[in-house]
Every structure is written in C-alpha cells, then in structure tokens.
Amino acid sequence: MKSDIRVVEARVSFSDEKARVPLKFGKVVMEAATYAEVEVTVENQAGNTAKGHGGIFLSHVWAFPNPAISPEVKDRAMRELVRQFAGKLTEVREFLHPVRLFLTLEEELRCLCRQTTVNYRLPEEFPFLAGLVCASPADAAVHDAFGLVNDICTYDGYGKEFMPELSTFLGADFPGRYLADYLRPVYQQQIPVFHLVGGLDKLREKEVTPEDPCDGLPVSLEKWIETERLFCLKVKLRGNDLDWDISRTTEVSRVAHEVYRRLNEKKEIFLSVDTNEVCESPDYIVEMLSRIREKDSQTYREILYVEQPTGRDLTRYNFDMTAIARLKPVLVDESLTGIQEFYQAKKLGWSGLALKTCKGHSMELLLAALASHHGLPYTIQDLTNPKLALIHSAGFAARTYPMMGVEANAHQFFPFSSLVEGKVHPGIFSRRGGYLHLNTLGRTGLGYRTEEIRK
C-alpha cells in the first residue's frame, strides 16, 4: 500500500524527572524516573516524509524490580535498549504498516533483551516486559509518523484501506476483521480519570505537615477530590497485610463520601485495588473481598476490579483465578506481554486485561481486539506518564472501549514535567470534574500537535 512506511532515521533523547512526592506501590517506592523520547523520520511509498514522536518513563521499579541489581545499572541497560531498538527500525528496508513493522522486530527485541543480560552481566535475564517498555516510545513514534505522513489520524489507519486483516496477525478467528472494527470511530471528548492513592499518600487534610509540598497543588486525597471532583480512585495495597488493606480500601471510600457530603453533591464512587503482585495466592484477595463485603457493603459495591494480585510469571504462578473472578473482575497486567500470555491468562481464569501503552502501541491494539473478540473487559492503565506519553495514553483510551476511563498519575507525582505540553492540551494535563478533556487533540498522527508544543 502507498501508505506503508519505512523508518529512515531515529533519534533518542532522555531527561531526568523528579517526583513531587514519593509513589509507593507493591514493595517499591518511586521518587525519580528517566523519561525517554524517540523521534523517527519515515517515508511512505508515495515518497512523502514526516517526523513522529513517542515517549515513556523507563520505570525499572515496575518493569525490572529485582532489588539485587542497582537502579543505576537497570537504568543504563534500559537506556541502551531504547537506543538499540530505535536503531533496528532503520534496518528494516521494506515498506510496512506500523503493526507489521513491530511484529517483524518482536523476536529481535527478545534477542536484544538476552544480549543486554550478557552485556551488563545481570544475575537474571533482562525481562521482556522491560524490553517492551524500552521499545514503546519508538513504536509510538512510528504510529505517530504513519498518521502524519499520510495526513490522517493514526487511528483511522487501522482499517482495510491501510492494513491487512487481523487474521494475518491473530489467526483464523478473524477473517475479514480489522483493528478498526474494535475501535471508536472518533475520540471521546472526555473520559473519566482514575486518581492513584499510593501506599504513602495522606488521606485527610489534617495529616498534611509542613514537610509536605507547598506548591499550590493538593497533597491529601481529601483535597484532591474536593479540588478536581474525582470519583474514580485506584488504591495501592500491600498484599501481605490484610487488616491494613481492608482498612485502607474502606477508608478511601469513606473520605470520598465525606467530601461529597460536605459539598452537598451526589457522586457515585468507583474503586480499583492493586497489590502489584505481592499476594502469595488468590486466597488473600478472596478473603479481603469477602471481609470488605461483610464490613462495608457500599465499599464492596464500589470496587470495579482487582489488578494483578499475584506474581507476573504465569508459568510459576499458574493460579486458578476463578475464585476471585466470582467476586470481582481480576485483570492481568505485568504478566501480559503478548498474544501467548493472553491465552494463558484466559485459560487460568483471569477476567480481563490491564492495557498500558508502555507495552507498545502495536501490541496493545492487538490485545484490545483480542479482548473484545473474546468478550473480556480491559482497562487503560498508566506508567505515571508525563509529557507526550500522557497525551498518547489518554488518546488511546479515548479511541478504545475501556472499563470506565483512564489512569493518569503524572498530575499527582510529576506535574511539573509537562508544563509545556499542558499549554497546548490543558484538558489533558489538568483534571476537571473527574475527567480528562481531549478536545485539543490534533487531527493527524497521535494528536500531539508536536510543532506547537516545541515552539
């Protein structure tokens, strides 16, 4: 197809970003992160060229959490892999659709992960999940450039006019079907936003001390809800302290209702709970949910889903998840790194998927189509995305069909990393009425409006 592209140049840059307040999830605390950005120049078969962009946090605390390896080593390894994968794009001389280009290089990415293990003398193999994070800004940049060079919204390039049918990628179950069949025809103009309640976050204003930030933004959950009228809350739990987790979940709900009673407003609250793989077995979550139902039926009703309670290795942690699924949907996140893992999780009784653009735009599109085809729900989760990464994630959520909305944590933890982007997209980089507002997305590419941002 004349719209097919090849990458003729790739540039990589990094910046060091410091968190406004520490973010605790699972067993780790995130206080800073490396932001990686990739710019690619592509040409299509019509001879046109364009530059596309993509970005992501290289969050090794999430993607590569082995405490035996220093953060400095993990960060250097991930930076190098970003460079290497971006370089591999320029070695493919065929003109391809971006999804086919990514799948062409998927095995090459696995090889790069193994090579990184050797080069950095790591005590364990460099995780493919971390490899996907490193590849994701380049993959996003290619999709952005694909839309720009063909003068279309990238999401309009997933139908029969621009790409092969899904059976090419997903097998015989998809004859005559295209990615476009599983996407919204236009962006939603606003989407509910999930606010993260981290393990160290203060719930009430009376808990705030002079040592907390005094920069005009809220600190406590109480003040965040009051200021932004939030109604979707993601609660980070410990996963090994049942009483604390139950108390924390019910207290978060209680704070939200207290705020809205004080404001004399009626608001339905939605919760998700996430232990980030710490639970030793599904039994922990079954007991937690059962006790919450007995103690506080309202909080129990408000819980939409449970996210990745047990370890990410589905071969080692091959638990039957149906006991949780009978109570609440249980969504696979860190374990989900490809098509094979999708079917493995489905067989084990996971209810649905937690999709993240940090695992690659191409793969998440395919997984969204798979989930929809099999009648499984999915969510669009976060990697505390700032800058272009947040625009990308919000746009992805606005063109798909996730449960409720999109998670967006940079507002809380890295708000000052995106001041430039926020001038062009104020509704994405501020949260009003509990929503992100996407009316500023551009009509071509992934909607960044990069030229205006870079003025």
Image (spheres, rainbow, N blue to C red):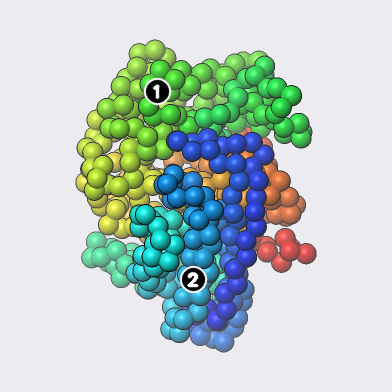
Q: Is residue 424 left or right of residue 13?
A: right
Instruction: Please name the residue that numbered disc 1 is placed on.
Output: 241
Give amino acid for label 1: Asp
Task: Please state the horizontal and vertical placement of residue 47, each as a whole percent of the image.
Answer: 57, 87
Nearer to me, 48 or 37: 37
Q: In this view, does 234 lie to the left or right of 34?
A: left
Give amino acid for label 2: Gln
Nearer to me, 411 or 66: 66
Residue 442 placement: quadrant:
bottom right
- In the figure, 115 relative to 305: above or below? below
Instruction: Please name the residue that numbered disc 2 is placed on.
Output: 84
Distance of mark 2 from mark 1, alpha carbons?
Answer: 41 Å
Dot 2: element? helix
Residue 401 visible in image: no
Query: Residue at the spot x=39%, y=23% of the render?
Result: 241
Task: Please state the horizontal and vertical placement of residue 440, each as a whole percent of the image.
Answer: 67, 54
Query: Residue at the spot x=67%, y=29% of the render?
Result: 219
